[in-house]
Image (spheres, helix red, strand yellow):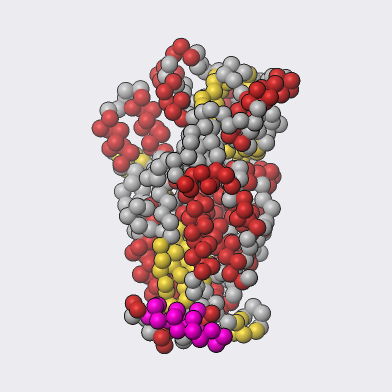
Amino acid sequence: MAFDGKHGTMLKLRSQLWFDNPDDRDMTALYIERYMNWGISREELQSGKPIIGIAQSGSDLSPCNRQHIILAERIREGIREAGGIAFEFPVHPIQETGKRPGAGLDRNLAYLGLVETLFGYPLDGVVLTTGCDKTTPSQLMAAATVNIPAIALSVGPMLNGWYKGMRTGSGTIKWAAKKLKTTGEITEEQYIDLVASSAPSPGFCNTMGTATTMNSLAEALGMMLPGSAVIPAPHKDRAAMAYFTGKRIVEMVWEDLKPSDIMTREAFENAIVVNSAIGGSTNAPIHLNAIARHLGIELNNDDWEKIGHHIPLLVDMQPAGRFLGEEFHRAGGVPAVVAELMAHGELPHPQALTVNGKSMGENCESKFAEDREVIRTYDEPMLTEAGFLNMKGNLFGSAIMKTSVISAQFRQLFLSNPEDPEAFEGKAFVFNGREDYHNRIDDPSLGIDEHTILVIRGEGMIGHPGAAEVVNMDPPKYLLEKGINELPCIGDGRQSGTSGSPSILNASPEAAAGGGLALLKTGDRIRVDLNKRSVDVLISDEELASRRAELDGKMPDYIPASQTPWQEIQRSIVGQMDEGMVLKPAVKYRDVAHK
Ligand code: FES
Ligand code: MG
């Protein structure tokens, strides 16, 4: 028994139900017996000390998060120092670059596994070890459902990559190197060297990809200790942060400070604003909308545009800018971004509570950047209006567009009509999935030219289990050789956060769920209007209706069969991307540890 600071009552630790339950001495004996078999004593288990889980996401299969195996030692020391007992356990591995057919498949599986673990074992609180793209949202989603005290520890980005004096950033260098290889400017050997140079140490992608984004947003949500999201993985401060995180979670148990106290609607609004200022990934709305749904908080892509679109881009980091994780950390990381937003009245909720028991405002006030080249002032940003647009029309109900990565060349090719500078039209070329794209894109007889809009479909959560990151399609080789580096792209798949392509993506509903993209034909004209946030195919409602009748509610024939049981199960119960692609039956379960 212990004092519950928040409610002024005596708090019974959850773990006592297992290890010291006066109402069930038989089960207590059973639980104690087996947990003692690795050398922990009965005295410790019945000492009334909180049992803290360390949800271990690192493994040889998950190299981005592997440093957590080493950091766990420091987490344990912090837990013990603060009077807790650490129980480390594995979570389902998710490796963005290693999982076939795609890591998106596993976010909800890792979520389910962690929910069961946190619910079913003697844990009073948990340290979530976050890092590679989906490892962060899956664990925050589980913490949201179970709602025991939880704190996240980022593994941190890799050190900067370098190649012949040039910074090479994860993913971003791959997209660039691929274009150079396609046009014959570099050899196969140089291509591999260039890409490999971007990964020089343990840690996650060093660009502002989905990993840096999601860890920064976990901090902006208040779920990490301030300043901890982007300390590089091998840095001494990273290990020290592991220790402080371990210490803090024990206090959080005594304070009964739960995920639902921290991840409020206000916290999500703060995170949306931070996402614009850092130039965050287009995967962020999917993941944050998912975490919110598991907490019962309304959050949708209209919120993202309304709250985030007008915010300027402050962080000069690849793919939108020049620098990488080391510089972002050295310049002040997330607190410096928040301080700058606050100073201009653009942090919507400075009073939002964080895991250290203080508000976001208290943590970040006046923590201004140490390097104004890397984190710009609000008045001299990289770019104004850096948030996402929520595009709608007769092809889909919602799709995200990251306007901050629109290049000068793209603007000149597609957005230079003086009478209508924010709109363009083009004929669609439709690919049924990425195989189709790869097989045909370079065929000159298709007639793809600089006025074509490339469309890819069948790549949503149902169409391609896990939703592939494929919407950023390169133009055909013959256009690349002419210097045309980008064509407008539309699709129901996702796109890597490390890509600088201004695609219209995450289209919901997807083709495989009866979305309008399923009705599109190559040669149809599409109009995109950034001012009106609209994307429409320019054909009559009658024609659309007749094409829908032809489809007759059937699954399009280009949608592949499931390969594993989980693919089939997930397809049958997963929601669309604008709603966070959560497992629909899962969102009604809230606060499960306390029921
Ligand atoms: Fe793991 Fe990018 S592949 S963080
Ligand atoms: Mg990625």
Query: Where does residue 195 sit, x and y in percent of width and height?
Result: 33, 38
Q: Is residue 400 above or below residue 2?
A: above
Q: Quadrant of the N terminus?
A: bottom right
Where on the picture, by quarter, is residue 506?
Answer: top right
Asked if residue 213 shows in the view, the reply is yes
Query: Where does residue 164 sit, x and y in percent of width and height?
Result: 28, 38
Residue most extreme to the top: 445
Query: Where does residue 533 sit, x and y in percent of width and height?
Result: 68, 33
Of residue 37 and residue 418, the one placed in the foreground of this image is 37
Q: Which region of the structure is painted magenta? A: 18-36
Residue most extreme to the left: 189
Of residue 510 and residue 261, the one placed in the foreground of this image is 510
Residue at (41% x, 23% y) in the render: 439
Query: Where does residue 381 sit, x and y in percent of width and height?
Result: 56, 43
Of residue 337 and residue 504, the one placed in the foreground of this image is 504
Residue at (46% x, 25% y) in the render: 436
